[in-house]
Image: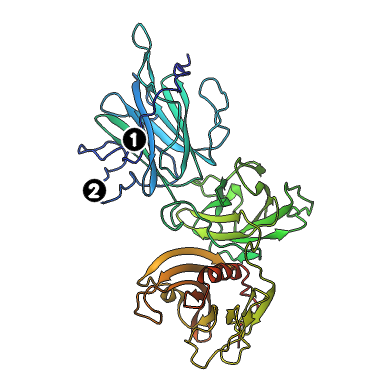
Amino acid sequence: MMRLLLAGLGASSLLVTTGAPTVPPPSAAPTGPAAPAPVQLVDQPLPPVGTPGSEAVETEDFPAGGFATYLTDVRAAGHESFDRFVLEFEGEEVPSYRVGYVEPPITEDGSGRQVDVDGSAFLEVRVSPASGVDLSGDQPRETYTGREQLTAPGGQVITEAVQTGDFESMLAWTIGLEERVPFGVTTFPDPARLVVDVLHQPGGDGGSGGLEPVGQGGTADVDVDATGSPVTLTDVRLGAHDDFDRIVFELAGEGTAGYEVGYTEDPRSQGSGEPVQVPGDATLGITLTNLLLPGDAPEAVTPWAGREQLEIAGTSTLQALVADALFEGRYSFFAGLDQRRPFAVTRLSDPQRIVIDVLNREPGTGVSLGETCTSPAGYAVDHPSDWSVNAGETVPSCSRFSPQDFDVPDATDVRVAAIAFSIESVAFDRVTQEQPGEQARRELTVDGRESVRIQRTATGEGLWAEGTPSTRYAIRLADGADGPRTLVADTVGLPGFDYQRNVAVLDAMIGTLDLDTGTEG
């Protein structure tokens, strides 16, 4: 018999205190697969529990039998680097459980009714034997009288949590998320609590906080070669965010997949050459390379076997992702968009992912780049048509850009132009070492090359006066005849320069960089 006697109790109060830690670390040792979080000092942020990852976490005896443990409270809240979800029970121990990602549609246990859960990824929490209603007496006793649908005050990834089952001693809640991110799980005794911490950012995605695109975005094709042995595609997912839509390809294997991303006017299937129907007014072609056939995947790896067309609610520009075919190690997809938009691509690790962010703005919004300059140093870049560019007498042409006329003196450290490009004979890792005054750092991919964008405020120990802001891009290039090379492009907030405007122009220019025009010498 279904135990859904909580219907109609949606008006009950939500037992969450906004701004306060949801579950302070107890002095008693927790039970379960993870060690307790250390006791925190007042001025230290609360760390997430468990060992965060994306694989399902379950006890060895799940689903266990026996007498049910009764739910008494459900709560969620945001913390500095994660959102927390808690199920609290009567008694001292949490029964067997399983926490893991599930694919839509989300359905209710027993009835099979489809349940609407807001989010782009769905984390299911199951506990057995457990229930929110005690049927052992003469009359049903409601042990949980809270809401069946709740949000996480102060949260950044949990969109909502919805009860999706209380049937035959199996309790289920489904957590809707902004996107699939690592999570940690543990239990605490006295009272018994199952705690799930969902990180604000995937590992390697640039730290905690609100999600941001993986790059500034551009419309030029991006091609990155594969390395090592072939890998297996294990998951494909979509995410909708405030300023961009995200496509994620997750892979498993010792090697790395390559990728080719670019707009196409004529999407066609691999092998057959037949046209592919793609929703939307613009099509972004995506091809992953160095992939194994599903039948050749290692025994412990489950290949992706998703739908041919993926869609999610809440996207601003992404209409659908259409899967084509895996042919000779190349897996092609087509993203249908409302119009051509800037996109950014990068590769993340642990697990290996290729992430494509389609930005919710038109190319060059706020910045008009009407001219292309090709430098003998081996790159081409677009710039505002009304800006001046150096002629190449002192430094290679297309190295200095400014809205005013200027001359480059022999002492090239003198800053005469708003934006400067240069190819330095210095290793990328050295150029990108953290310096005093660094304010922000973002790893990204520029024209298929590993890159970093760094914002810094001068401390007075270098060329610029204390407090002078700067934005710098460093892009790893292939070694030259004389050793390592790094392309550096930056703008500095010196007197007489419109720093904010110049940063916007620099960001737009980086999105147009072509690093395959040949190298000087």
Q: Give the residue pinned by disc 2.
A: 42
Q: Give the residue pinned by disc 1.
A: 17
Indicate whether 40 appears above or below 190.
below
Image check: 217 left or right of 29?
Answer: right
Which residue is most to the right?
274
Q: Residues within 10 Å of mark 1 (few under 14, many from 20)?
A: few
- Using the image, tell me which numbered label, if any, was put on residue 6: none
Say what secondary structure mark 1 lies in.
Answer: loop
Q: Earlier in the sequence, mark 1 or mark 2?
A: 1
Q: Amino acid at mark 1?
A: Thr
Residue 257 appears anywhere in the view? no
Indicate whether 290 appears above or below 46.
below
Q: CA distance from mark 1 to mark 2?
A: 18 Å
**Quadrant housing residue 67:** top left
Q: Amino acid at mark 2?
A: Val
Q: Position of residue 398 (x, y in %)?
A: 61, 82
Q: Residues within 10 Å of mark 2 (few under 14, many from 20)?
A: few
Say what secondary structure mark 2 lies in.
Answer: loop
Which residue is most to the top?
138
Quadrant of the image containing the C terminus: bottom right
- Give the residue displayed 45% in from the left and 68% down from the top: 454
Q: Colour scheme in the image?
A: rainbow
**Quadrant housing residue 432:** bottom left
Q: Position of residue 58 (x, y in %)?
A: 39, 36
Q: Position of residue 130 (x, y in %)?
A: 37, 23
Image check: 121 left or right of 48?
Answer: right
- Give the residue displayed 76% in from the left and 58% down from the top: 265
